[in-house]
Image: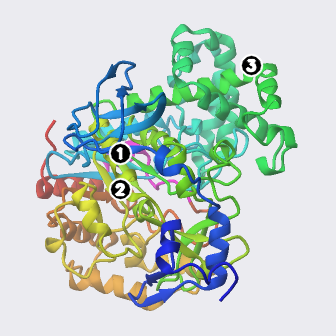
């Protein structure tokens, strides 16, 4: 054995978070190598010896207080009594237990998430791809509101959209919504310029930029950088012309958001000045709390205010889009290592380590998503605040949450720097506490939570998610059992953004796309999906793509699942999937739907599918 490992048995390693023995994707026993264990130990660091006496306490109403405490400082600023041995009867929320002048975070959680009140169906959409004639080359928050109105009129109960988080700097946009710079803030590229107060005052200048922006709709390719150049110029002109930074409403909102949003604005501006990622910036700017950053913020006060104002506008427009509708936002599993959150939380992350997935039948070499993981003990020492902020920001405005790779709340596949994905290893997280935080935010927002539990799922995870009222995922492309046998506490769907569309399978276009992207495509796998449509959905050999879509969703609509989802890509018989994993093709996350929103509203294929789902699944209750 390697030095430093021989004195630790599996249980001791597990106490550090390292799961040395596990089952692989084929459910066969597997063990980490000594080299991997040593690398993971180095990445994890040495836990604070005082952590167990200072880490957050997470409880449920009715639990018995089993720690020394003199009282509780409630999050509303008031105080109340609590003593060891007493039954906990405190409001849900984030409080502080006080003992001998020491404060320790006390989280009171309901333990379970909110469930949908009725069985319902909804559209899944990539917002960037869902354009209207008013769009500036990309689907925006106004388009989301229009889609939500259409969905509600069709009898749908929800709209599920891609992550809307900030991506890249304000000059360079990141195409993948699952590689955000921050999970706390929105991407202002989705702002509908014409809906910003004061836009009309720009007159001919706005008309010129608007013409340039709408001309971008002529291409099926979403050119985010060009879109943002037009929008940023228009938005900055509105900000300056209307003196928006002096608005009392904005100033009050900015005050409530506190230092976190000021840091985000500073990162945005510094990333424009120093391209290449914060680890390569001049040393004085590499830490957000440095005197140099504070001085920079003072010198660039107007620019900082503008970046913060963009977030205010984005929050207002997203809230307006979701008014009267249930919009589920998606939470990515991590953040860009060179982004704003990584800069802000650099002391809590295992920088240089990537989150990914072990080898499986779809990726024989495993996957490295290049996202740095939080160090579990450091996250606890930080009172879980970064995770709380990410969940709250993603669930509070929309009315629902999808958690990408929900298994990561239990454990994540860490890939130490310089190692290939197949040489990574599992690091465990305090799942009970984390799930309680998700439940608390769900109840506060009155919003259901869906967990994307596809891929390698360890035993017991789905059962625990069900106990917590987190809906599972069931895909027609993956499930062996017929939809009628799928669980009630789940979201039923045919496919996802990373998998083939129905039309792509039926026409063979998806197989062609894979080969053109350089993938060693599995023709037999595509043939199996096509055969599934024939044998299980009853699609005839000469059927059209639209008929194949209708048959697939007719089959899925019979699932007893609380939520049934249909993609707009399928409804429009789009042959290309939104993303081909493991490739760098230009179309990834950048292909618009073949129909505008107005055309979608009038298309008989879309209308027919919506009518069928409403009849089969049932209208939502208002």
Please tell me how crowded label 2 is: few (under 14), some (14-19), or many (20+) other residues with Cα within 10 Å: some
The residue that disc 3 covers is: 301
Outermost residue toward the right in this view: 282
* For marks 2 and 1 on the same chain, the one whose residue lies earlier in the sequence: 1
> Residue 255: image x %, image y %?
56, 18
Question: Which stretch appears magenta?
Answer: 589-603
Q: Residues within 10 Å of mark 3 (few under 14, many from 20)?
A: few
Report, in whole angstroms, how far the alpha carbon at label 2 lies from the one at label 1: 9 Å
Dots 2, 1 in contact, CB < 8 A: yes
Q: Residues within 10 Å of mark 1 (few under 14, many from 20)?
A: some
| Residue underneath mark 2 | 432
**Residue 58: numbered disc:** 1
- Picture quadrant of residue 555: bottom left
Quadrant of the snapshot with the C terminus = top left
Per the image, is 592 magenta?
Answer: yes
Residues at marks 1 and 3, CA–CA distance in whole angstroms: 40 Å
> 334 or 165, which is in the foreground?
334
**Label 2 residue SS:** helix
Q: CA distance from mark 3 to mark 2?
A: 42 Å
Q: Is residue 22 left or right of residue 351?
A: left
SS of the residue under disc 1 = strand
| In the foreground, 608 or 486 | 486
Whether pointer 3 and pointer 2 mark residues with C-beta atoms closer than 8 Å, the reply is no
Instruction: Give the total of numbered labels.
Output: 3
Give percent across and percent down for residue 482.
18, 77
Answer whether residue 400 is visible to the viewer in this image. no
């Amino acid at each position: 054995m390697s030095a430093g490992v021989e004195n630790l048995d599996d249980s001791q390693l597990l106490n550090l978070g390292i799961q040395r023995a596990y089952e692989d994707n084929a459910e066969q026993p597997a063990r980490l190598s000594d080299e991997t264990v040593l690398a993971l130990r180095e990445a994890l660091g040495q836990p604070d010896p005082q952590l167990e006496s200072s880490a957050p306490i997470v409880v449920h109403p009715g639990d018995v207080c089993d720690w020394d405490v003199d009282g509780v400082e409630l999050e509303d600023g008031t105080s109340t009594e609590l003593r060891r041995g007493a039954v906990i009867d405190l409001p849900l929320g984030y409080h502080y237990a006080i003992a001998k002048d020491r404060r320790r975070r006390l989280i009171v959680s309901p333990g379970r998430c909110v469930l949908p009140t009725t069985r319902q169906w909804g559209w899944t959409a990539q917002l960037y791809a869902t354009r209207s004639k008013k769009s500036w080359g990309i689907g925006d928050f106004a388009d989301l509101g229009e889609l939500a109105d259409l969905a509600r009129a069709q009898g749908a109960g929800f709209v599920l959209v891609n992550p809307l988080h900030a991506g890249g700097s304000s000059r360079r946009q990141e195409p993948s919504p699952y590689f955000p710079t921050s999970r706390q803030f929105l991407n202002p590229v989705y702002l509908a310029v014409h809906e910003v107060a004061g836009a009309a005052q720009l007159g001919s200048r706005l008309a010129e930029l608007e013409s340039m922006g709408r001309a971008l709709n002529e291409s099926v390719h979403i050119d985010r950088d060009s879109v943002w150049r037009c929008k940023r110029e228009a938005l900055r002109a509105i900000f300056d012309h209307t003196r928006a930074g002096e608005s009392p409403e904005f100033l009050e909102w900015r005050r409530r958001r506190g230092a976190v949003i000021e840091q985000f604005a500073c990162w945005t501006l510094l990333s424009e000045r120093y391209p290449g990622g914060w680890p390569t910036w001049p040393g004085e700017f590499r830490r957000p709390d440095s005197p140099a950053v504070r001085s920079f913020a003072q010198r660039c006060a107007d620019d900082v205010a503008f970046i913060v104002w963009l977030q205010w506008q984005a929050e207002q427009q997203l809230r307006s889009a979701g008014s009267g509708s249930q919009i589920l936002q998606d939470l990515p599993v991590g953040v860009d290592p060179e982004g704003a959150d990584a800069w802000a939380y650099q002391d809590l992350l295992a920088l240089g380590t990537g989150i990914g997935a072990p080898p499986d039948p779809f990726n024989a070499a495993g996957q490295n998503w290049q996202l740095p993981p939080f160090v579990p003990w450091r996250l606890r020492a930080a009172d879980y605040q970064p995770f709380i902020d990410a969940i709250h920001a993603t669930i509070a405005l929309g009315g629902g949450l999808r958690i990408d790779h929900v298994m990561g709340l239990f454990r994540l596949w860490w890939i130490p720097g310089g190692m290939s994905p197949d040489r990574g290893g599992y690091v465990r997280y305090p799942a009970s506490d984390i799930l309680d935080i998700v439940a608390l935010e769900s109840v506060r927002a009155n919003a259901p939570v869906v967990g994307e539990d596809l891929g390698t799922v360890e035993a017991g995870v789905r059962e625990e998610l069900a106990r917590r009222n987190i809906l599972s995922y069931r895909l027609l492309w993956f499930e062996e059992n017929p939809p009628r046998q799928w669980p009630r506490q789940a979201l039923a769907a045919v496919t996802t953004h990373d998998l083939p569309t129905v039309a792509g399978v039926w026409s063979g276009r998806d197989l062609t796309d894979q080969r053109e992207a350089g993938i060693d495509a599995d023709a037999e796998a595509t043939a199996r999906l096509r055969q599934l449509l024939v044998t299980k959905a009853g699609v005839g050999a000469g059927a059209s793509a639209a008929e194949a879509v209708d048959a697939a969703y007719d089959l899925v609509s019979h699932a007893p699942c609380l939520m049934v989802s249909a993609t707009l890509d399928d409804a429009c018989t789009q042959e290309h999937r939104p993303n081909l994993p493991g490739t760098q093709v230009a179309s990834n996350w950048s292909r618009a739907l073949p129909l505008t929103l107005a055309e979608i509203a009038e298309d008989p294929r879309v209308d027919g599918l919506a009518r069928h789902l409403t009849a089969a699944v049932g209208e939502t209750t208002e």
